[in-house]
Amino acid sequence: MAESWVLLAYRLPREPSTPRIALWRRLRRLGSLQLSDGLVALPEDERTRERLEWLADEVVEAGGEATVWLATPATRAQGRSLAERIGGRAAAEYRDVVSEASRSPARTQTVARLRRTLRAIRSRDYFGSPEREAAERAVEALAAQLEAAA
């Protein structure tokens, strides 16, 4: 469980909407946790801190306001809750990969797409979800079916 979190507080003008949408997409790719409107959190490490600092710079360049904060939840229960929320999303994404791999035909494009999806999920799996192994096995089983058919 993360004891320290990096927060990005931001505000962007409504128009043009392009910077707002781009920011939302990048935050989603990072797996950030939306705490409230204009406030997101990630477990603190060098990588997440640097990425949120870059995003803060982009917000300012787009005419908005942004600050990056380091924070520690007031109680262990609050910290656990944040970690469970982020970890739960990664676990759900891994379960979706297992489901898709089990019902998809063994095609080169499908295996390649699922492998890309796994890489993306791993990049935002900050707490090492136990579902990761099952997802990796499911994708590799699909790849093995493809090789066997060849």
Image (spheres, rainbow, N blue to C red):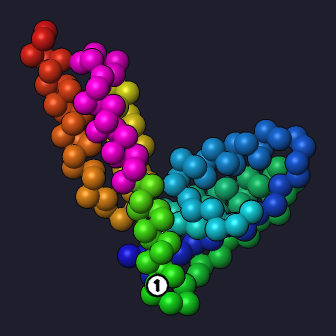
In the image, what residue type sits under mark 1? Answer: Ala
Tell me the quarter of the image containing the N terminus. bottom left
In the displayed structure, 86 sits above or below 100; it is: below
Dividing the picture into quadrants, the one containing residue 7 is bottom right
**Which sits in the foreground, 140 or 104?**
104
Q: Is residue 33 visible?
A: yes
Using residue 133 as the reference point, say whether residue 115 is left or right of it: right
- Residue that mark 1 sits on: 77
Dividing the picture into quadrants, the one containing residue 105 is top left
> Which residue is at 41% across, 59% downward?
88
> Which residue is at 61% across, 52% downward?
27
Residue range of the region highlighted in magenta in the rendering: 91-111
Using residue 11 as the reference point, say whether residue 69 is left or right of it: left
> Which residue is at 50% across, 90% downward?
75
> Which residue is at 83% across, 55% downward?
12
In the displayed structure, 123 sits above or below 145; it is: below
- Is 92 part of what is drawn in magenta? yes
**Farthest-out residue, left:** 148
Using residue 117 as the reference point, say whether residue 148 is left or right of it: left
Q: Position of residue 84 (x, y in %)?
A: 43, 68
**Farthest-out residue, top:** 150
- Element under label 1? helix
Tell me the quarter of the image containing the C terminus. top left
- Is 136 part of what is drawn in magenta? no
Q: Is residue 50 visible?
A: no
Instruction: State how many labels appear.
Output: 1
Secondary structure that dominates the magenta span: helix
Q: Position of residue 41 (x, y in %)?
A: 58, 67
Q: Position of residue 13 (x, y in %)?
A: 88, 52
Q: Position of residue 35 (x, y in %)?
A: 64, 68
**Which sits in the foreground, 55 or 22?**
22
